[in-house]
Image (cartoon, rainbow, N blue to C red):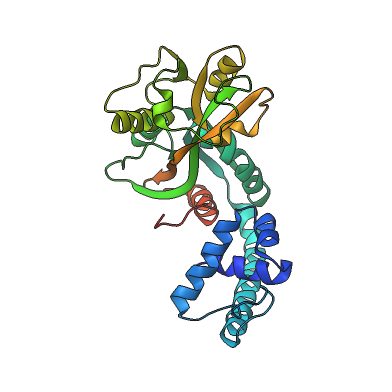
Amino acid sequence: MDFRELQSLVEVMEKGSISAAAASLGISQPAVSKHIAKLEREMGVKIFARGQKCSNLTVEGEVLYKFARKTISQLADIKRDFSDIADDVSGIVRISASSIPGDFILPGLLVEFRKLYPNIEVEVRISDSREAIEKMVTRESDISITGHGRHASGFNTVPFARDELVLLVREDHPFAGRENVTLRDLENMDLVGRVTGSSTSRIWEDAFKAHTGKGKHVYLKFGHVSAVVEAVKKGAEGAVISRLAGAGEMEGLVMIPFRPSLMRTFSITYGTMTTKAMEMLLDFLLQRKMIGDDE
């Protein structure tokens, strides 16, 4: 069992439902359900009485719930004890990240990190996935977060977050009213996209070729997803983008999921942590990863 699973159990009990627990934790309802199911599988018990509400625990569930509350409380105490230590740690940590984690995942996390470790300076350098990995290999950065999908020799790689790729079109496009599209639907579309080196482009183009048996040429490519979105707003027929990139201003645009879903994993890649500041940031990120090691 891990901390996320125990935290999900406590939140379900305290909030009274899986949906309320998911909202409190900032994760999906299926993720909470998966944590509970994994706890049951690992411990070999049923946590909730069959056919009953989430507030009705089995005898074994009651024992596990008390353990989870105690563990979380003890961890909170330890964090408070460490707060004084954190104030004394200083230094610079450099992160190289591809645009989606760099623009849409890291900002919120690093604001939280800044509050915990006010004397550690963090620099985030955003590029495409390939360049972000290269910066870490050449020691221009200490940690990289990308959807590169390939392990860098001599470095550690840990899954960090999942992302879904979707088709972006204007709301007047013939596909706009559809619940989903297939890769074959892209065949006759004049798409805009990301430059070579982007994991977004690599993943959907590889999937398209595997699905249709031929490549898909994109004639207009941009280095940043914001430019891709703007191009669609200005009249480009469509683009394949990250669902996370749709968190911003999307008036007049529609995101359509693929069937089957087109998913990717962002990973943290790192080498030897040579300073306390590096260790602090890496530990912070690993504690907040949004995906299990086996996913």
Residue 152 in sight from this viewpoint = yes
Position in image of residue 253 (x %, y %)? 63, 24
Position in image of residue 277 (x %, y %)? 52, 48
Q: Is residue 133 left or right of residue 168?
A: left
- Point 53% across, 20% down: residue: 228
Is residue 151 depicted above or below 103 in this figure?
below
Q: The C terminus lies in which quarter of the figure?
A: bottom left
- Point 65% across, 47% down: residue: 112
Closer-to-camera residue (226/18): 18
Q: Quadrant of residue 249?
A: top right
Q: Is residue 78 left or right of residue 100?
A: right
Q: Quadrant of residue 229?
A: top right
Q: Quadrant of residue 114?
A: top right
Position in image of residue 67 (x %, y %)? 59, 80
Closer-to-camera residue (6/30): 30
Is residue 212 depicted above or below 218 in this figure?
below
